[in-house]
């Protein structure tokens, strides 16, 4: 099973020039744990997470005065819609992230989160006639 079957396509993004406060507002309003950071052409250049913002606040920085570029993780780790869910889970474990941007030609088209993966696996497992507890590699 691939990312395109489980990803969310309603994605809020921020730019590196946006204020960190704006990113925090979006995270709270949308009840998500991270946002892709994009350049003017929509290419992913990083991710800003709730933990990035919490760390920044704990160190006395005013989010209204900081830019997303100053607080984001600039590792543009992302997956493509055709990526297998097992690979996504491996990446999430290895990099200790809760979500990954989904990109086509470097542009954000969605986000895949741990919740999306769980929802897909749980739904798949709940289908009558399916083998329970199937390994991700069997998808």
Image (spheres, grey):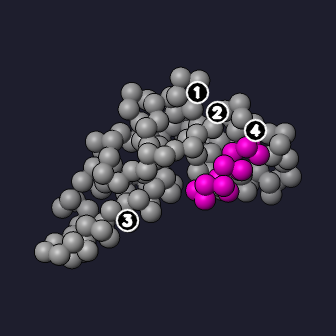
Residue 135 position in % (x across, y down): 23, 67
**Which x, y percent locates residue 36?**
55, 41
Query: How far apart in space, not on screen, are marks 4 and 1 (Cα)?
Result: 14 Å
Q: Is residue 102 magenta?
A: no
Rendered view: 95 above or below 126:
above
Q: Residues within 10 Å of mark 1 (few under 14, many from 20)?
A: some
x and y, in percent, of residue 127 in the image:
21, 72
How much space separates mark 4 and mark 3, taking CA atoms? Answer: 32 Å
**Which portion, as a residue range, is magenta?**
20-33
Is 113 or 54 nearer to us in this picture? Answer: 113
> Where is mark 4, residue-wise?
19
Q: CA distance from mark 3 to mark 2?
A: 29 Å
Left or right of 22, for residue 139: left
In the picture, the quarter occupied by the C terminus is: bottom left
Does residue 58 appear to the left or right of 74 in the view shown?
Answer: right
Q: Could you tell me which residue is drawn at 73 percent across and 57 percent down?
A: 54
Q: CA distance from mark 4 to mark 2?
A: 9 Å
Whole-angstrom CA distance, mark 1 to mark 3, is 31 Å
Question: Which secondary structure lies at badge 1?
Answer: loop
Q: Of circles 1 and 3, which is in front?
A: 3
For residue 25: magenta?
Answer: yes
Occupied quadrant, residue 122:
bottom left
Horizontally, residue 31 falls left or right of residue 1, namely right
Mark drawn on residue 39 = 1
Checking the image for residue 119, the label placed there is 3
SS of the residue at dot 2? strand
The spot of residue 109 in percent (x, y) is 43, 38
Q: Are marks 4 and 2 in contact (CB under 8 Å)?
A: no
Give whichever of 132, 8 is nearer the camera.
8
Residue holding disc 2: 15
């Amino acid at each position: 099973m691939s990312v395109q079957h489980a990803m969310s396509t309603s994605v809020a993004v921020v730019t590196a020039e946006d204020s960190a406060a704006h990113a925090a507002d979006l995270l709270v309003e949308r009840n998500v744990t991270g946002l892709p950071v994009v350049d003017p052409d929509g290419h992913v250049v990083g991710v800003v997470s709730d933990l990035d913002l919490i760390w920044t606040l704990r160190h006395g920085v005013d989010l209204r005065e900081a830019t997303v570029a100053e607080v984001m993780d600039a590792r543009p780790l992302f997956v493509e819609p055709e990526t297998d869910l097992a690979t996504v889970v491996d990446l999430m474990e290895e990099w200790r992230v809760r979500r990954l941007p989904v990109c086509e030609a470097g542009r954000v088209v969605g986000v895949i989160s741990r919740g999306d993966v769980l929802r897909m696996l749980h739904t798949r497992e709940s289908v009558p006639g399916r083998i329970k507890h199937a390994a991700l590699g069997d998808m």
